[in-house]
Amino acid sequence: MSSVTSSSISATRAWFEFYQGEQQRVAEPVARGMCYLRRPDTGEVWALNKKKPTMVGSHPECDLVINDPWIRAWHAAIRFVPVAISVVDLKSSAGSFTERRQFSRTILSKDCRIDLGDPRRKRTCSLDLTIDPTQEPRLKVWVNRESISEMPIRQDVLIVGRSSSCDLSLPVSHVSRRHVRLSRVLGTFVIEDLHSDSRTTLRGRRVQSDWLIPGDSFEIGGVKLSFAGDMIPAMPPEPVWRLMTRDGIVELDKPILNIGRDADCDIRLDGVAGASRHHARLIWRSDGTLALADLNSIAGTMVNGHPVSFGTVLPDSLIQIGDWRAYLIGPR
């Protein structure tokens, strides 16, 4: 357990960059946190730029020029998204593949091979995507622009608050006894406010739950902390799963979605008889499955007509809270 004894704590944001500078062609990977492509048949290596898409094709203006006959002028685009790497096929005739599966758009979060052209027909250009090994995630507490405390995050769940029983104790009056919980989800961490009195702000806005991206600063009760580590987590499955409700379609594109009457819930149950302020929660597990948890509500939560406290939910499931119903839409 770590603690901070100062009563007035302020911080500046500690920024993390995967890679700084313009796209460049390199003989060997040279920077920690760099992501790069390697063509195994020629040994050529290209570093990826976080700030702009890397265009791949046979056109001379592409960032990565490949002159194989089946490569289209503008074949694919590779770009960083907040916590992973997106690859989009630009309507090429030969197609783009990962793990021998064709895609129009995919999210990548681990080392893999991208094939431009069908690998089964041996008309393909293979590119091996390498993501540098990650550093251990850690939290820093700052005072007057200086880090006064730093702790690695080795456990799957870390509680931050004023109580001495918290994993990270901040004895400051405006910090709640148990203020936030950091949970390891899909390879990185999610921050979740534990219904604190003074709330939690992340990237300048109040949040109930959200991804923590390396370099993020968040504030609890006037205390600022920064999250560091060059982690690239997996993402919720593509295509994005959805809930079909009487009010419309809700995309399940966040690591945790809270359901209830409270204004900070992701799915609001206004006017639903029997609904609690914080009634239930949808959670993406580390193995990519979706779980539903009832938050000790009075009326309970039903899935396909059966009461649940916690369990996996599958596509075509019917979730019911009072007279509110939602159908889960996802790949079978």
Image: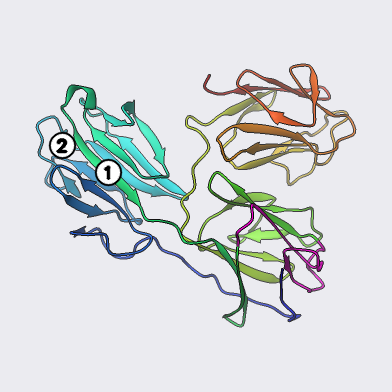
Above-or-below relation of 324 to 262: above
Q: Which mark is residue 144?
A: none
Residue 251: say if magenta: no
Residue at 15%, 36% in the rendered image: 73
Numbered disc 1: secondary structure:
strand
Outermost residue toward the right?
298
Q: Which mark is residue 73?
A: 2
Quarter of the figure with residue 186: top right
- Binning the other alpha carbons within 10 Å of mark 2 as few (below 14), some (14 to 19) or many (20 upward) gives some
**Identity, as a three-letter code, of the amino acid under mark 1:** Asp
* Relative image position of residue 16 (x, y in whole percent): 45, 65
Above-or-below relation of 112 to 141: above
Residue 154: say if magenta: yes
Left or right, 199 with reference to 64:
right
Position of the N terminus by quadrant: bottom right
Nearer the N terminus, badge 1 or badge 2? 2
**Identity, as a three-letter code, of the amino acid under mark 2:** Ala
Quarter of the figure with residue 124: top left
* Relative image position of residue 54 (x, y in whole percent): 27, 48
Residue at 12%, 46% in the rendered image: 42
* Relative image position of residue 189 (x, y in whole percent): 59, 52
Give the magenta part as a residue range. Answer: 153-177
Can residue 39 be seen at all in this image of the molecule? yes
Instruction: Between residue 44 and residue 245, name the one nearer to us.
Output: 44
Q: Which mark is residue 128?
A: 1
Left or right, 268 with reference to 126:
right
Numbered disc 2: secondary structure:
loop
Q: In front: mark 1 or mark 2? A: 1
Residue at 81%, 39% in the rendered image: 295
Q: Main secondary structure of the magenta part?
A: loop
Quarter of the figure with residue 322: top right
